[in-house]
Amino acid sequence: MSRAKSLLVGLGAVCQRLRDVMLAESIPASSRGRCIRGSTASSSGSPWRTWSLQHAHTTWSNTTSLGGQSLRSFSTQQPPQLGSGTRPSPPNYFVGLGNLRDNPGATRQRIRVGRGDAGRRNKYAGRGMKGQKSRGGPHMLFDGGQLGLLKFPVMRQRPPYEVLYYQLGLSRVLEFVQLGLLDPTRTITMKELYDTGCVTSSIKYGVMLYGKARLTFPLDIQVTACASETRGCVEAAGGHITRVYYTMEGLSAILHPDKYASRRLPLPLPAAGWHPKYDKKFDSIGQIPPAVRQIVLALAPSPASMSIRPMAAGGTAGAVEEA
């Protein structure tokens, strides 16, 4: 016998004992509760499958008292009707995972439209013959052919400018200096980076310098932004990085001045200033054309130059003496 069957048999025995005790103590019939009993007559021979919840809708009420103790008895009620605002009656069978289903009347079978001329919703399925509504209908935001999206403002978030900057590595700048394409004795601007090919695409918002490299000479460069580790490498070698602020129009003017020269137009004026939220992101306002200053390289002289300098000095002195 399974565990469920043994529990049901034990429950029936307890109810039978309770009924016999109440009858023996001559409790009035009006307060006598009927025990939950199950019918053992079943077509399959399993009494637990035909168990009936006869007292599912009952309430407790204090009706009698015996020996100074109040006895509670069952008072039966009719199961509520569907739609009456009360809880529906539970099923009269044991619910398991194999027989889960909705209450009677909770769902309705849908009409399967478009099943031929003899069906209930036949041929055109209630949509008619032609037109937009017979072909699926417009989309959910369609508002009669006008600009319906104006009712719902589209919020677009602009990414930070650091993402839009051209990413330039410090090692690439060092490579162009070693090849002689960039002059380290003067300030390297974004115009020179663009003209020499160090920056391979159009600069729309600015140039961001990043990365590390071993520098043996000072480097003065003007960019829009730079990483903290890059600034440390350049300043350790005695160089300087200036973060200049340009508007999109001003940056286009210094990169492509021929557009203004061909139309005989003056170059735009530098920006008056930047927004207060950029106070810690820029060092100065970029000039148009960019301001370039000469710097002196603090390099140790090579042995070849040391051997040549006395001869040149002596030759010069001799020439002066002869003069």
Image (cartoon, rainbow, N blue to C red):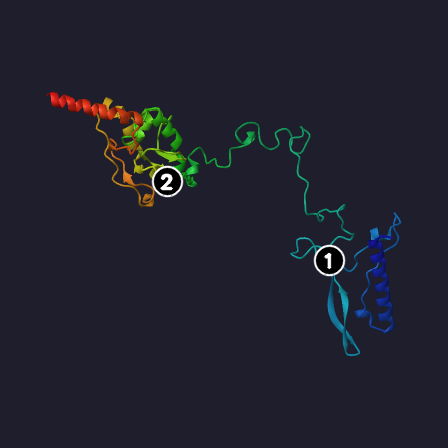
Q: Toward the viewer: 141 or 170? A: 170
Quarter of the image where one finds residue 57: bottom right
**Residue 11 at x, y percent in the picture:** 83, 61
- Residue for badge 1: 79
Residue visible at 68% across and 45% down?
A: 107
1 or 2: mark nearer the eye = 2
**Residue 210 at x, y percent in the picture:** 39, 35
Q: Toward the viewer: 92 or 233? A: 233
**Residue 65 at x, y percent in the picture:** 77, 76
> Height in image: 23 above or below 221?
below
Q: Toward the viewer: 215 or 320? A: 320
Quarter of the image where one finds residue 216: top left
Residue visible at 55% across and 29% down?
A: 135
Q: Can residue 48 be seen from the camera position used here?
A: yes
Kind of element beneath mark 1: loop
Q: Residues within 10 Å of mark 1 (few under 14, many from 20)?
A: some
Label 1 and label 2: CA atoms lie apart by 84 Å
Q: Is residue 235 left or right of residue 309?
A: right
Q: Is residue 250 left or right of residue 144?
A: left
Q: Looking at numbered disc 2 in the image, what kind of residue is underneath it?
A: Gly
> Height in image: 88 above or below 231?
below
Quarter of the image where one finds residue 152: top left
Q: Can residue 263 be seen from the camera position used here?
A: no
The quadrant in which the C terminus is found is: top left
The disc, 1 or 2, on the residue closer to the chain's N-terminal end is 1
Q: Toward the viewer: 283 or 71? A: 283
Q: Looking at numbered disc 1 in the image, what kind of residue is underneath it?
A: Pro
Q: Is residue 137 left or right of residue 208?
A: right
- Residue for badge 2: 232
